[in-house]
Amino acid sequence: MNATPVPALELVCPAGSPAMLKAAVEAGADSVYCGFRDETNARNFPGLNFSPEELRVATDWAQERGARVLLALNTFARADATDLWRASADSAAQAGVDAIIAADLAVLSHIHTNHPNTRLHLSVQAAAGTPEAIALYAREYGVKRVVLPRVLSVEEIKALSREINVETEAFVYGGLCVMAEGRCALSSYASGRSPNLSGVCSPPEAVSFSDIDGERTTRLSGFAIDRLPAGVAGGYPTLCKGRFRGGDSGEATYLFEDPVSLNAMSLLAGLAGAGVTAVKIEGRQRGRAYVARVTAAFRAAIDALARGESPAPYESLLNDLAEGARETTGAYRKRWR
């Protein structure tokens, strides 16, 4: 028996490269988000992102196919390099992107003042989760959409939606962060860099490996953060997902955060009912095949809901992609405060 159709959700997918952007659009993304090849975006990894010319070409290509391009300019500007953020904002506007995602007040002000026809989305890096905070960004900078912090339950989002006059966007799939939306004290302490400032967590140049007595030790800036038998695959080495000896057992375990992926596909109807405009996939640092698979699965689930059907047949399609082979609905269904 068919359920009542839910409001259509915009599907926002990651594009860490021109090839990933094409894969996402072809797999059914309504919008794609990407960044420049510098520290103005929170996924500033080698081999990722776009030059201004690549962004212009990709934006034209996507828009010709009915997809929107959102440019993530979502790190916080350094006092000695604010021209870089201004220039990036200008380049994005000139490329004709459909919106710029930003968090820094000065960046928001520059775009609002100098590019008033460029739509502004408030990044999750701003961690705006109250009606008063969101109203301030909308009033002062013309923000049209807020990407919600990943600490709100569905009921909290529903209550929030009743009190604000901007669109909302919620993460539904991908990696989770134990820190407050990119403000990583762990990465900052160990390497001097963090996502909200320099656009990278556990920068590759700070990671090293050593093989001794049949074991591989992973280090970040000299700190040993994991040790596995040689040949056993591990995830990308971040301090929060490192294993350390602690407690009475003395066994190595995850002290900060277990490897687990967010998968809120089962909550899509609830999020739509709570007033969410768009749902977002994390993963600009992932590969093209990953983006294509996740996009296609969520496209099928959203389309099923729009037809009044259950998305249940699609909920297990991505199990093998989850970190640590485990999934969670995160704070959307939380029993803690």
Image (spheres, rainbow, N blue to C red):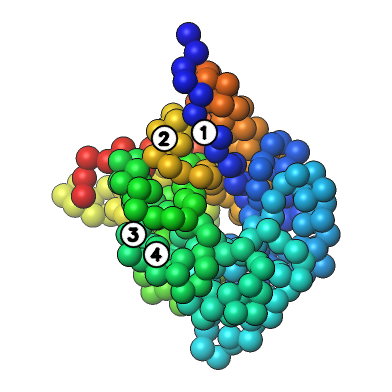
Say if mark 2 contacts mark 1, CB within 8 Å.
Answer: yes
Q: Is residue 115 above or below residue 268?
A: below
| Amino acid bearing label 2 | Gly
Which residue is the site of mark 3?
A: 131
Position of 51 with respect to 246 (left or right) is right
Residue type of the residue flagged with mark 1 = Pro
State the mark number for residue 327: none
Residue at 70% x, 76% y is 90
Label 3 element class: helix
Q: Residue furthest bottom?
A: 80
> Residue 273, labelled with which disc?
2
Q: Label 1 neighbourhood size at 10 Å, few (<14), some (14-19), many (20+)? A: some
Q: Are marks 3 and 4 in contact (CB under 8 Å)?
A: yes
The crowding category of the residue bearing disc 4, from other C-alpha atoms within 10 Å (few below 14, some 14 to 19, many at least 20), is some
The residue indicated by pointer 1 is 7
Q: How far, Cα to Cα, is label 4 from label 2?
A: 21 Å
Percent of width and height locating residue 284? 61, 53
Residue 182 % position (x, y)? 44, 64
Name the element at disc 4: helix
**In this figure, which residue is indicated by the disc labeled 4?**
135
| Residue depicted at x 16% and y 49% | 248
Regarding mark 1 in the picture, which secondary structure is present there? loop
